[in-house]
Image: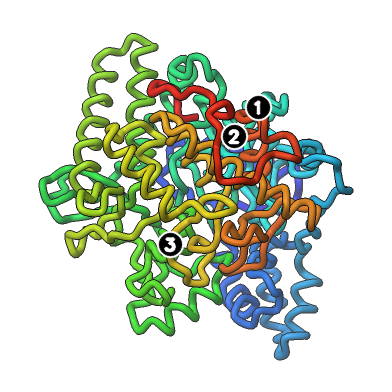
Amino acid sequence: MPFRTSHPSLWRLAALIGLLTAPLAHADRAQWLYPTPARLFGPLFTRVQMDAIFPDGMTFVDAVPKTAPRIILRRYRKDDPRTRAALLRFVQRNFTLPPPDHTHVPPAPTLRAHIALLWPLLTRPATVPPPYSSLLYVPKPYIIPGGRFQEFYYWDSYFTMLGLIPDGRMVSARDMVDDFSYLIRTYGHIPNGNRTYYLSRSQPPVYYLMVGLLDARDPAHAWADHLPELKREYAYWMKGAAGLHPGQARRNVVAMPDGALLNRYWADADTPRDESYRDDVLTARASGRPPARVYRDLRAAAESGWDFSSRWLGDEHHLTTIRTTDIVPVDLNSLLYGLEEAIAHGCEARHESACARRFLARARRRRRAIDRYLWDRRLDYFSDYDWHTGKRTGELTAATLYPLFVGLADDRQASAVAAVTRARLLQRGGLVTTTIVTGQQWDAPNGWAPLQWIAIRGLRRYGHDRLAYGIARRWITTVRRVYDNTGKLVEKYNVEQELPGGGGEYPLQDGFGWTNGVTEALLTLYPSLVSRSAPRTSAVHPAHTPAASAHRPAF
């Protein structure tokens, strides 16, 4: 356990020493240096979470201890609180609980005005966390999603940045890139969020897209400036590739039957998630499977950002059949293709020709592997691949649009994906996540802001402007309708009925970072949607669709 002290000045010194030494550490050492609440509080943690003394499992893991864990644990053994009420009183005496959400603002006349009011409320300053807090230090202010999420999240932040920049907040966007660069240098990867309990996993690798936003006219220049961090993140995702034989997997890397390397979601830990401890324990108990396997698959699904979805389930209606680590996903491999190309272009900008050739070759190999294993010629769309069975899953999801977003699809594939998107994924309120209703939040009837953006930019990239505009118009209409009825921008939406979304492990959250960002970005991209009287008919007039370019950057 790292050196801890309750004295503020000594704590800051200890934190500084840890931060200076951590860049040399492996991810496992980082987890040792920054233990999670489960490790710090052992039996007390287990009792609090399993007895569910708080409605939300995040409450206790985000609480700040008032003194050293060993002292609190000694008090716990001495007091021996037997009832839930007594246990709650003990926690309240010994911890400072997270403050209530303060992201509510008075109604504004327009969506844009509401979003502008929210940014300051969602901004958190750069501060050294208190002793034993689960919060991880970052050097610059950052934007949180809102609601129960009082820390930043990796892939959320890219979609949030999409709105910060057109709203005139480039300084905030640069600060967030600096924070993520710091995390890569410090821990060797970007954790799921800036909490100790997120260190065992990452999230979809969109850091290169964030960096590209800093210089939209010449993203290669921005990538060149951040080349060490880009390479280090790439190394994290490819760790374990050396020595893999066809049909084997190690960490995030899978060797396909022909020896090609693709990637999967993974997590370093195989224990229940601190923030969802009780839920994970109950899921593992009901599964009849080795608990460690279930826990790792639950954590890997959290790394995917799609927690949870039928994509990861053996039986689409039962979370107990989760098998995330068996799946080679379309979205992850598309983003890693984009990362490989970004590194190559960054190397070219720095006149490092050998590096550029190396990463372009890796991107070409990945593209061929995606075409061979993730493109379904019978169904005419991209789908995930189960590397254990050697078969594609065949499930149609919004992830099928990621190859268009990064530009790796050919024109015929793009046209086929556009056709199936129009026929099966497009709903009255936007793009649905999957075609299956399971009660999981990343399934029908829900739609999510990031997936709308991925689809719209991907379709525009291949000239399918009418469909792209149609998705944007329907989505903005849904967001506006819910805002008119509730005064909120929420985390997810029911796009079949143009209502707030549902399902998942926790109640619907409002705030909401990536919805704000994508809404602002779409209103910038399509000025005709700014009007509250935007047309609601299914017809899309070409005049509303700016010309697409096959060479337009995805971001």
Question: Closer to the observer: label 1 or label 3?
Answer: 3
Asked whether 544 or 373 is in front, the reply is 544
What residue did someone put label 2 on? 179
| Residue 120 placement, left or right of 169 | right
Vertical order, 88 against 437 (above or below): below
Residue at 75% across, 73% down = 91
Vertical order, 555 against 52 (above or below): above
Type of amino acid at the residue the image marks with label 3: Thr
| Residue 460 placement, left or right of 391 | right
The answer, for residue 28, to whether it is visible in the render is no
What residue did someone put label 3 on? 435
| Gap in angstroms between the C-alphas marked 2 and 1 | 17 Å
Type of amino acid at the residue the image marks with label 1: Ile
Vertical order, 439 against 208 (above or below): below
| Element type where label 1 sits in the image | loop
Asked whether 129 or 165 is in front, the reply is 165
Q: Which dot marks residue 440?
A: none
What residue did someone put label 1 on? 165
| Element type where label 3 sits in the image | loop
Tell me which numbered mark, 1 or 3, is placed earlier along the sequence.
Answer: 1
